[in-house]
Image (spheres, helix red, strand yellow):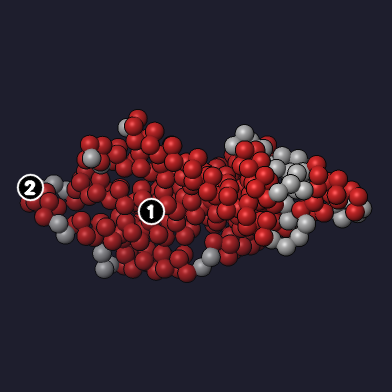
Amino acid sequence: MIRFLGQRLVTIPFVALGVVTILFFIFKAVPGDPAALAAGATATQAEIEATRVRLGLDQPLVVQYVNHVLGVFVGDFGYSTTFRGNPLPHILARVPATLELAGAAIALTILVGIPAGIAAASAHNRWPDVAISLTVIGLLAVPNFWIGMLLIAFLSVQWGLLPSFGNAGPLALVIPSLALAARLIALVARMTRGIVIEELRKDYVRTARAKGMRRGAILVRHVLRNVMIPTVTIIGLQTGYLLGGSVVIERLSAWPGIGDLLLTGVSNRDFALVQGITLVFVVGFLLINLIVEVLYRFINPRLRYA
């Protein structure tokens, strides 16, 4: 396991280097003068030139690239026009709120999606299966921001049950986490239903029934273990989607996470801030994939000795 973790962790800096390189040249190709943006709208030409020299934008492109890469790997993400300095401390200050929102969405997915899929499969072709399947189709058909707007309109504005924006306490987490988790719950429920139906038709299930084992015990002791690996896969992959999807939900509910900060950086044409947040997203996605692979080895012992 230690060797496996070491091999995976070694690749993360190289992937991060590739992302930094791509983002650097993309933003260099974007129209506009970074020095003029950093100096401000009322700056004179002399002030713009002084800002260009201070930020190293007067140097050759190769030198700028090397300095940028070296700076990123020591925690210097460049000059943010929004914060007038290195944006990394401000990005890191927003990370806990995004992790809190994503964690709540994943918890809802596990607590609702997996039991819903098992319940639908257990009542195959009966009314609970039809009701759950129709709900899944509906959740997959609508975007999460529309669900968030409906939740705000009814639970907050119409009925006054929950706060509609901000991070004022546990209740403020309900609406954004529900909106963010809705699609993932539907995906997990649909996939779990299909796998459980397939597993219930296999020989080992018929053998267990012939021995007198109850249906519930078969589901928990045998079928659920075979369901976990693909379920962990889809949840792990979709966690990266949660990080990206949180951008809209955080802005909709004024949640103080890095998704909301990313939109601020885009609207302000703050290249350093956008690059820093994108890199944080990428590294987070890589770490999530690593966690998923470690979970594989705990769920399926055969993978530990492969």
The residue shown at (51%, 52%) is 242
- Picture quarter with the C terminus: top left
- Badge 2 crowding class, 10 Å Cα cut-off, few under 14, some 14 to 19, many 20 or more, is few
Res 227 visible: yes
Image coordinates of residue 48 in percent, x first then y, are: 86, 50
Q: Residue at x 80, y 48 (%)?
A: 52
Nearest to the eye among marks 2 and 1: give it.
1
Indicate which disc residue 300 carries: none
* Callout 2 amino acid: Lys
Q: Which residue is mark 2?
A: 211
- Left-right relation of 28 to 177: right
Q: Quadrant of the N terminus?
A: top left
Which residue in the structure is indicated by mark 1? 234
The percent position of residue 229, horizontal first and vertical second, equals 30, 48
Coordinates of residue 239 in the picture (x, y in percent): 47, 50
The kind of secondary structure element at disc 2 is: loop
Whether residue 251 can be seen here: no
Q: Amino acid at mark 1?
A: Ile
